[in-house]
Image (spheres, grey):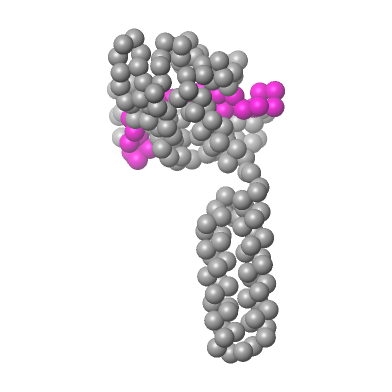
Amino acid sequence: MYEFLFESPLYLGGLGLVVTILTTYGWLQTGNPIALKSAVGLLLATVVLVALNVFVVTDREAIRQYLLDTAAELQRNEVAKVTFRIHPDATQMVLDLKAELPTIHFKTVRIKSFHAVDFTPARNPSSVTVRMNAVVEGERLGIQGTVPRWVRVTLEKYQGQWKIVDYDHREPHYEMLNDEGRSRLDSYRR
């Protein structure tokens, strides 16, 4: 319900508009003043809820924007800004990528879709795992290429800011595989 109220302005506005139209139609057919008052109330409620939906930034939306900003910084080759987003206790894979960043010239870094943003609020510090698909085009050591990937990024709060603590990537279709397919694909990486 929280996601519907604060992260779906089109769905909320559409539902409010449909119910308002139906109530207005009921008033036009019956002339009942209660139906008119209901239609006006529903229209006002829809406008207020859509305005709230647009102006309230949820944690999920903030995380998405954080990752979109990180992708934009990568595309602009702002290595210092990107490395600032890395947690000091990051996994070895993240630290290895951090060391490789200066050798890569990014042309395009685009997040195509977010599959899930899963919070773990019970942990202290709180953490979030994001699964998404991304496409990266760039050059490293004279070799150019475009790489579509399924990516899992884990962020953790550190001194009041989200920092990248873990990272993993697979083939782009990884999210669509069942458990058996994922385990087979994972076995090839070892």
Residue 96 seen in this snapshot: no
| 129 displayed left or right of 38 | left
Boundaries of the magenta span: 154-179
Rendered residue at 54%/30% (across/down) = 69
Q: Position of residue 74 (x, y in %)?
A: 47, 23
**Residue toward you, 129 or 49:** 49
Quadrant housing the N terminus: bottom right
| Count of numbered circles in the view | 0
| 121 displayed left or right of 180 | right
Residue 79 seen in this snapshot: yes
Rendered residue at 57%/19% (across/down) = 81
Q: Is residue 38 above or below residue 28?
A: above
Task: Check if residue 16 falls in the magenta segment.
Answer: no
**Residue toward you, 111 or 4:** 111
Q: Position of residue 3 (x, y in %)?
A: 58, 50
**Residue toward you, 133 or 21:** 21
Rendered residue at 58%/90% (across/down) = 30
Task: Check if residue 159 falls in the magenta segment.
Answer: yes
Q: Is residue 27 above or below residue 140?
A: below
Quarter of the image where one finds residue 135: top left
Q: Position of residue 16 (x, y in %)?
A: 57, 66
Q: Is residue 77 above or below residue 25?
A: above
Q: Position of residue 171 (x, y in %)?
A: 33, 30
